Amino acid sequence: VILPCDIGIDKIKSLNPKGIILSGGPETVIESDTPKINKALFDTKIPLLGICYGMQTIAQELGGSVIQSEKREFGHANIEKISDSKLFDKIDFQENSLNVWMSHGDKVSTLPNNFNAIAKSENCPIAGFAHSEEAWFGLQFHPEVTHTNEGIKIIENFVYKICNCEKNWDITDIINGMKSYVASKVENEKVILGLSGGVDSSVVAMLLHQCIKEKLTCIFVDNGLLRLNEVEEVLDTFSEVGINVHLSSTSDLFLSRLEGIKDPEKKRIIIGNTFIEVFEEEA
């Protein structure tokens, strides 16, 4: 479940989570009007993993210090393991070094009471920390991105070994759940979808077709700005799988409205508004 940073503590308790990950963000905890962790969260004893900004707000709210780094980091860095931690269980620190992805301008300079550093880097002496008794952890680097070696394993350690969650689903469960939800909402109605031929609308079209079959009609607008043979390729691709696609050949309309326009932003607005107009008319 993904929730906003200002969610109330009562709502969090009602969900009875096994663990909470506090994500990174573009703000700085040094300023007074930026998002902070609700201190009441610590009273719940729920396992916590703070990533980047999430680590910094844990440190600050529990009495540690966060300062602006002398050197901002954005890119690859090598961290060194200082002490053992469940987060690093079976993580391959080759010669005690792990390549990770950093993206921060602030850093924790003083640990709160009962916290220990578990990792460091050349520019960040506290690149990871852990509470000595509670299941509270912080990482200055980003394990959630592919640029961090074994980052997914670190997150899995938190989810499965620290929070004791069970993996009782896979991606097909999500797809089947979505299909059942759509079918129950549509029932005997019909659905129209704006199809561009791009990844997003194409995936939606395929999933909807699996859910509601002939109840789906896609509208594909030829605005005169498509790649060579793209119209034919889109129509052929979706006809092969049995999806009903209605072609709206309105290139003359789009091109006439763009004639003489040089400003890119004005072009964008004209194209967007014309798309809406054409789509509504075709629908």
Image: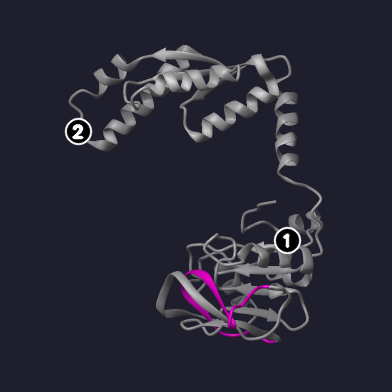
Q: Which amino acid type is shown beneath numbered disc 1?
A: Ile
Asked if the magenta segment contains residue 84, the reply would be no
Crowd around label 2: few <14 · some 14–19 · many ≥20 (10 Å): few
Q: CA distance from mark 1 to mark 2?
A: 52 Å
The answer to which of 272 and 43 lies nearer the viewer is 272
Question: Whole-percent x and y of residue 268?
Answer: 32, 33
The answer to which of 93 and 141 lies nearer the viewer is 93
Q: Is residue 38 visible?
A: no
Q: Residue at x 48, y 18 (%)?
A: 235
Disc nearer the start of the sequence (1/2): 1
Numbered badge on residue 262: 2
Which residues, given as a range, are shown in magenta?
91-113
| Mark 1 lies on residue | 9
Numbered badge on residue 169: none
Q: Residue at x 35, y 26 (%)?
A: 226
Question: Whole-percent x and y of residue 204?
Answer: 58, 30
Q: Is residue 4 visible?
A: yes
Q: Which amino acid type is shown beneath numbered disc 2?
A: Lys
Query: How has the structure been colored for display?
Result: one colour
Question: Whole-percent x and y of residue 21?
Answer: 67, 63
- Left or right, residue 105 beside residue 217: left
Question: Whole-percent x and y of residue 50?
Answer: 63, 69
